[in-house]
Amino acid sequence: MTENSINLEVMLKSHLPIIFELLNEQKLTNYQWKKLNRNFIRIYEKRKKEYFKNNEYLLVKSNIYDLITSSIKGELKATMLLAFIKKTLEELTDNLSISEKKKLRTTVYNLLVSFDSKYYNYLGELLILNNLLRSKDYYLSEIESKIVNKKTADFLIKKRDDTESHLIEVVNVHVEDAHIDLDKLLTDKLVAKLNDKRDGETTYLDFKLVPVIWTSYENLRRVENLYKNGFSISFESVWEPTAFAMFTYPENRVIYRFGNISTLFSIMEEDNTFVVNNS
């Protein structure tokens, strides 16, 4: 693969054009696109070496460009996730003013330059923000807004009549182990994040911690059961986790959902012909 054989800007314009509307006039420069292409090629060549070094086996931490490539190849799961991302970004674009879009440039840029599964972290932030703004009752006031000292929250949202505001910190939790103690994992992750953001101070601006969990269907159901059985970290500042799940009918009609863990799978209770596709 050479620099002339890959053009990520063209790929995104063809398969995820809403990115450019969200960036608005804050688009990447030609230099940034060239650098992005070079980095992508470097990662690709590294993967290829590891593939042959490990007897033609490689477990890849995918990125947004892998997702698009898999969708082009007709892989259903990738196509479903890409469609969901596109729909989310379209909603978010409609709900943001030009000045609000400018504030999100860094988050969108980080989504584009993450060449591993860290891109899910930035996607998680955008998913949560979209959910918060969907009602149109709130607007995005600031990003990386101060909590205390040099600690910040991802977003500061305010009610349109300015009677209410919330500092929002998104914490992405990736769970790969099917046998891990989820109670301990969630408690440790969330308490560590709370303590980090409080920076050892007893006085700080109130903020809300919003967990986004990325894991398999089986683990999501385990998390669901934890919360249904009363799991709590005993802090009002921690909201119920959200997660993403994909469903299809037997004939491959698609439903995708992102929402609170307690109601995420209610669709299965309403119609038992759905199949879950989270890996």
Image (tube, rainbow, N blue to C red):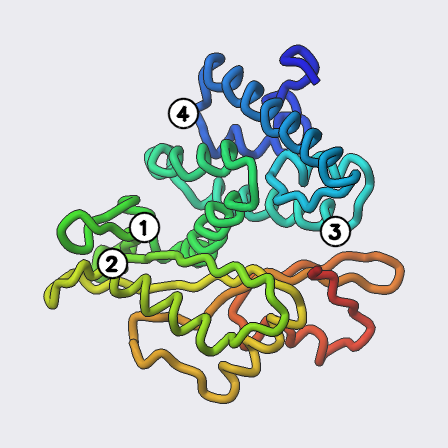
Callout 1 secondary element: strand
Any mark on residue 77, and which? Answer: 3
Q: Residues within 10 Å of mark 2 (few under 14, many from 20)?
A: many
User: Residues under labels 3 and 4: Cα distance?
Assistant: 31 Å
- Give whichever of discs 2 and 4 has the lower sequence position: 4
Q: Are marks 1 and 4 in contact (CB under 8 Å)?
A: no
Residue that mark 4 sits on: 26
Q: Residues within 10 Å of mark 3 (few under 14, many from 20)?
A: some
x 70%, y 15%: residue: 5
- Give whichever of discs 1 and 2 has the lower sequence position: 1
Q: Are marks 1 and 2 in contact (CB under 8 Å)?
A: no
Q: Are marks 3 and 4 in contact (CB under 8 Å)?
A: no
Any mark on residue 197, and which? Answer: 2
215 and 253: which one is in front? 215
Residue that mark 1 sits on: 155
Q: Residues within 10 Å of mark 4 (few under 14, many from 20)?
A: some
Q: Is residue 172 left or right of residue 38?
A: left
x 56%, y 19%: residue: 38
- Give whichever of discs 1 and 3 has the lower sequence position: 3
122 and 181: which one is in front? 181
x 74%, y 61%: residue: 277
User: Residues under labels 2 and 4: Cα distance?
Assistant: 29 Å
User: Residues under labels 1 and 4: Cα distance?
Assistant: 19 Å
Closer mark to the observer between disc 3 and disc 4: 3
- Give whichever of discs 3 and 4 has the lower sequence position: 4
Residue type at mark 4: give it: Gln
